[in-house]
Image (tube, rainbow, N blue to C red):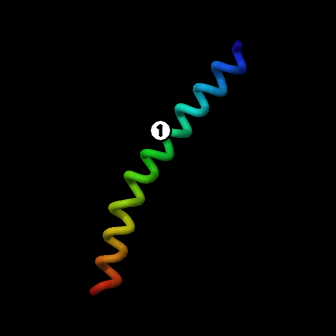
């Protein structure tokens, strides 16, 4: 049961980290595209 909780916790944290990474990466990619266009 303890390992199940740890696995679930790690999965939730990983999912949240992935969402945060995508939210951070999208504006960065947009800025990079705009800079390259100039």
Where residue 34 appears, as percent x and y from the top left, is 29, 77
Residue topped by disc 1 = 16
Q: Is residue 12 left or right of residue 7?
A: left
- Residue shown at 38%/51% (left/top)? 23
Query: Which of the image's four quarters has the N terminus?
Result: top right
Residue located at (65% from left, 23% from top): 6
User: Residue 32 falls in which quadrant of the image?
Assistant: bottom left
Q: How many marks?
A: 1
Residue 13 percent coordinates (x, y): 53, 34
Give the x, y percent position of residue 26: 37, 60
Q: Residues within 10 Å of mark 1 (few under 14, many from 20)?
A: few
**Could you say which is closer to the camera, residue 28 or residue 7?**
7
Q: Secondary structure at mark 1?
A: helix
Using residue 17 as the reference point, say whether residue 7 is left or right of it: right
Q: Nearer the viewer, residue 26 or 35?
A: 26
In this view, 13 is above or below 2: below
Seen at 38% across and 68% down, the residue is 29
| Quarter placement of the C terminus | bottom left
């Amino acid at each position: 049961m303890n390992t199940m909780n740890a696995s679930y916790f790690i999965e939730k944290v990983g999912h949240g980290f992935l969402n945060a990474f995508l939210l951070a990466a999208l504006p960065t990619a947009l800025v990079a595209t705009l800079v390259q266009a100039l």
